[in-house]
Image: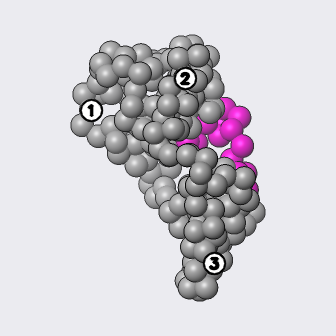
Amino acid sequence: MDPAGYAADTRAIDAAQLPMSARMAVARARVGRRCAGFVPGDGLTRQAIVAQRVRAARGGNLAAEAALLTLGQPLQSSADYKRHLVERVRASGDPDAYLALAPAMGLAASGDDSLDERIAGTAFTELAWQLAACQLGLDCGPDSELMTRYCANGGICSPDPTQDFSSFVYDAAVPRQGTDTMNEMVNKLVETTATGAGS
């Protein structure tokens, strides 16, 4: 990590004066403040992050275990393990675990037979997992980590600074004719937390 370089990039984005530059610069400044204590000498590499998550996962942290699957470094590589992990996350009702698993359940799961018949395999299924995390108690407000991540990393920013993640998704990402399908997926993900994971 290079906080100084990140800050310089943020200033360049702001100066570009593109339609979302100002919102993206605000989001990146928020990330920059959170990361200001780190310096390149801290050795905060991808390998170090994976190693820390492996330790946490082996210690019983379900969100860390889900994050490892998203990173392509699951604790076990078998299809049965992957299916069981998804079922444990769904049964847990842990919004952090849902959020950590969401990218692995999006396009990354397309064509993955081990996740057949589960809510997986498209960009919309990733959003469904994230929306379910919001319903389960994750902070998804205007200044939440989730809104900040989309804006700071991908330039996908709401033009309304008061909009939360759920309303932003339904306004900007889900076509009107897809609203019922999205609601069904989210409701199914949330409902299984009380009864144990289903399909």
In the picture of the structure, the residue carrying the numbered disc 3 is: 11
Say which quadrant the N terminus sits in.
Answer: bottom right
Task: Give the spatial CA distance, label 1 vs label 2.
Answer: 27 Å
Residue flagged by tag 3: what amino acid is it?
Arg
Residue flagged by tag 2: what amino acid is it?
Arg
**Is residue 67 positioned above or below 29 on the image?**
above
Task: Give the spatial CA distance, label 3 vs label 2.
Answer: 36 Å
Q: Quadrant of residue 104?
A: top left
Q: Are marks 3 and 2 in contact (CB under 8 Å)?
A: no
Foreground mark, 1 or 2, reads 2
Numbered disc 2: secondary structure: helix
In the picture of the structure, the residue carrying the numbered disc 1 is: 112
Q: Label 2 crowding class (10 Å Cα cut-off): few <14, some 14-19, many 20+?
A: few
Instruction: Residue 90: give x, y in percent of width and height.
Output: 53, 23
In the picture of the structure, the residue carrying the numbered disc 2 is: 55
In front of the other: 127 or 63: 63
Q: Residue at x 49, y 58 (%)?
A: 173
Residue flagged by tag 1: what amino acid is it?
Asp
Which residue, as the protein is rendered here, is positioned at the far front? 41
Q: Which residues, given as a range, are shown in magenta? A: 130-144
Residue 191 image label: none
Task: Give the spatial CA distance, label 1 vs label 3.
Answer: 41 Å
Q: Earlier in the sequence, mark 3 or mark 2?
A: 3
Numbered disc 1: secondary structure: loop
Instruction: Residue 75: give x, y in percent of width and height.
Output: 41, 21
